Image (cartoon, grey):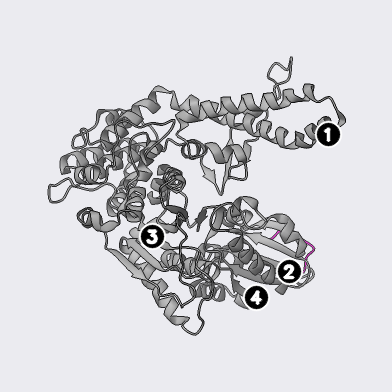
Amino acid sequence: MAAHLSYGRVNLNVLREAVRRELREFLDKCAGSKAIVWDEYLTGPFGLIAQYSLLKEHEVEKMFTLKGSRLPAADVKNIIFFVRPRLELMDTIAENVLSEDRRGPARDFHILFVPRRSLLCEQRLKDLGVLGSFIHRDEYSLDLIPFDGDLLSMESEGAFKECYLESDQTSLYHAAKGLMTLQALYGTIPQIFGKGECARQVANMMIRMKREFTGSQNSVFPVFDNLLLLDRNVDLLSPLATQLTYEGLIDEIYGIQNSYVKLPPEKFAPKKQGDGGKDLPTEAKKLQLNSAEELYAEIRDKNFNAVGSVLSKKAKVISAAFEERHNAKTVGEIKQFVSQLPHMQAARGSLANHTSIAELIKDVTTSEDFFDKLTVEQEFMSGIDTDKVNSYIEDCIAQKHPLIKVLRLVCLQSVCNSGLKQKVLDYYKREILQTYGYEHILTLHNLEKAGLLKPQTGGRNSYPTLRKTLRLWMDDVNEQNPTDISYVYSGYAPLSVRLAQLLSRPGWRSIEEVLRILPGPHFEERQPLPTGLQKKRQPGENRVTLIFFLGGVTFAEIAALRFLSQLEDGGTEYVIATTKLINGASWIESLMEKPF
């Protein structure tokens, strides 16, 4: 059991156990010793649901990464390929199977597609002459992976591009399937709200899937009260801005992958006397970040400026606890102190790690360039000078700063101005192509198609209306003891979360005009519950809303939703699901065309 998955109102261990059971059943189908050949992208998400020990119990003796040419030698009876349904991976698998040594002992091949089998992939294997080599061809429907007690992700890295650029609905189908799995485990969700084109399609798919299962009545008592489906393109602004929460900044600077972060090792080397700084470790320090760690759960969603004081308070508490040993006189007192020791040592280790991480982040956030960039972002978001060429962006291009940084800023300006004047847009494009290379013309085209970098049509900027009506910009933000969600960006309240907040109370009818400005339809569907399963809420009991971001969500938005969940009179607790955990850099990168 993963304890941190069951601390919230919804016990996500139930989902984790269900997917583990399905994995065990598949492994047991392949009798005898096994080697797994992994599509490298899947190893991270799989690590969150099944450690090596579980695989070992089911006779998995070796694990390899999927690569061309021959498979490494392994004295096993079964070779299982765990892969996403991608055509290029089928070519590699065929190469592996065809180069299998015929003289050696015969091995059985199996293939497990995650999350769905694909006719195209099976056809490719058939064309390459290897389809008949596989005894089991199965799918493993790993749609939503529990990351934390209130967080689920599909980790589908291409979802935004597929939905908005290629009109490919595969990831929306997977999202609908994942939601059906959740309803099978946690009961039918009585009300579905949504905003955006993709949200509408997912809701339609869910309703159709429910019709197809009419024979069986879901008799699980519902845990969720509402489902809110939100398109990422309803709020293109939030991922572009720099996140200013502790977890958000770790992700912005170092990148968090499947709840792990890799950090420069020199900050974490134990300091020894007279060492003279030699033998510093060269291997990156890898840490897991989730709410199983008490200190991290406390500081992850705070604005970074409020983290230092928490860490210094914790340091005092821990050193006072260690001082207690001098006061332990009797055997009983000593015994009690010793029993607390492991917990205290873990707390001290955790504090040391987070103090080091905070120092690393502070080095970045106190730099002049970080301050300049943040100033420009905040000017755009509060509506200052969004309609002309920005001199800081010009300087960044002239000094050839990383292209992703430049694109993020230009897109932010475009979104805060409902598109740029043609003259300004052409100037930026020309400067970018001349500085970074003409191959990036395809990337600029993608950004335009996604609505991130576009000419202003109709000559009207609707952002000021959104900003005022939804209170997206707050001038006086209390970062230490926040009273509003705008603390996560030190002034800007994420539009997506504001929509969720207003849906909870007073309801979306109060903002009909704004909803019409934002792209895509908004809708409400009811799913009737059989009698006896209708929920009677106790006085003071909060509603539970599952909010699903189609196209990705940032850690700052997650922090803002957690802040709303913890409000005394909030009335709603949120569980967050998404196609992918993103930040501005990884999001823009997913839209960039790789030059050949």
**Magenta stretch: residue 515 in it?**
no
Q: In the picture provided, is 377 more to the left or to the right than 354?
A: left
* Three-letter code for the amino acid on which mark 4 is drawn: His
Q: Which residue has dot 4 on it? A: 136
Callout 1 environment at 10 Å: few (<14), some (14 to 19), or many (20+)?
few
Nearest the eye: 54 or 110 = 54
Q: Which residue has dot 2 on it? A: 78
Residue that lies at the very extreme toward the front in this rendered image: 539
**Mark 4, secondary structure of its residue:** strand
* Three-letter code for the amino acid on which mark 3 is drawn: Leu
Earlier along the polypeptide chain: callout 4 or callout 1? 4
- Distance Cα–Cα, label 4 vs label 1: 56 Å
- The magenta region covers 71-78
* Three-letter code for the amino acid on which mark 2 is drawn: Asn
Q: Nearer the viewer, mark 1 or mark 3?
A: 1
At a point 36% along the width and 57% down the height, the residue shown is 230
The image quarter containing residue 578 is bottom left
**Magenta stretch: residue 76 in it?**
yes
